[in-house]
Amino acid sequence: MPITPAQFPEIINRISASINQHADAVTELDQAIGDGDHVYNLQRGIEALQTHSNDIVNLDWPAAWQKIGMTVMAAIGGASGSLYATLFLSLAKNSKDKPVNIDTFTEAFALAVEAVKQRGKADVGEKTMLDVWVPVAQALKQSVASSKTLAEILDTVCSVAENGVENTREMLATKGRASFLGERSKGHIDAGAKTAQLMIAAIADQLQQAAAS
Ligand code: ADP
Ligand code: MG
């Protein structure tokens, strides 16, 4: 079954439930090395996307990514707002006028993660959400190239995301607010990496369930 924006309301509701469920734990992480508003920022964005989900279901993927990016940009404050807006607007740009399939998505997604790196002037190893998004984009490329099933691809991506989160723990933060703490940023997981992983897991759960039904 092709994955279309018709599944968007279920996906965004699942993301919302997961972020809400882990809100206190993630806020604790963010209070340790950030300013504690990351979950609140994401929740604003998710609520705005839920409000617009009835429009999004009727769009094709490039137009849906564009709408999602614009909505996120308007609704989310903080570094994460402009970074997620960049991710979705770049997905829109790089999937325009192309057939929709796992290969074109994988290609567009890798370019979108590159755009986020440029936007934040950051890369893996700096204790940010990129420590999840970059290895996930690479794992997606590798598992699609080796013709794995959708279930296998999703499993791989989810475990790579979990490792990415754990890897941030001992990193020294060199970007974002956590970098102000220098050495004291070590020993804490990055909140933005954790929420990226939670969102990926929620999307994967929804896609696995849809594929099974
Ligand atoms: P702010 O840092 O402006 O308060 P948020 O609290 O919403 O914004 O988001 C913080 C998260 O954003 C961090 O945990 C980190 O994962 C991510 N982040 C911060 N700066 C960058 C950057 N330059 N590149 C990539 N991700 C970043
Ligand atoms: Mg913050």
Image: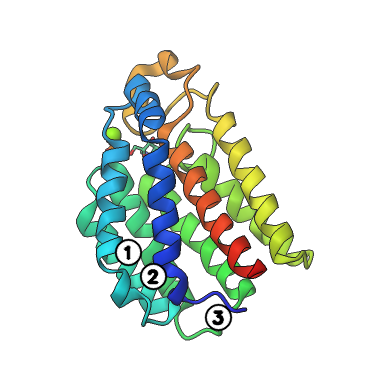
Query: What amino acid is labelled 1 in the image?
Result: Gly
Q: Position of residue 40 (x, y in %)?
A: 26, 40
Which residue occupies 36% across, 29% down? 24
Element marked by disc 2: helix
Residue 142: tell me if it is visible.
Answer: no
Q: Kindly indicate the quadrant of the structure image that contains residue 163.
A: top right
Please tell me whether residue 62 is drawn above or below residue 40 in the rendered image.
Answer: below
Task: Please tell me which residue is depicted at 47% across the width and 61% down the height of the picture.
Answer: 112
- Mark carried by residue 69: 1
> Which one is earlier in the sequence, the residue at label 2 or at label 3?
2
Residue for badge 2: 65
Dot 2: within a 10 Å radius of its alpha carbon, few (fewer than 14), some, or many (20 or more) residues? many
Of the residues shown, which amino acid type is indicated by label 2?
Trp
Q: Is residue 48 left or right of residue 189?
A: left
Question: What element does badge 1 sit on?
Answer: helix
Q: 128 or 8, which lies in front? A: 8
Relative height, residue 27 to residue 199 (above, below): above
Q: Quarter for ligand 1?
A: top left
Mark 1 residue crowding within 10 angstroms, few (<14) / some (14–19) / many (20+): many
Q: Which residue is mark 3?
A: 100
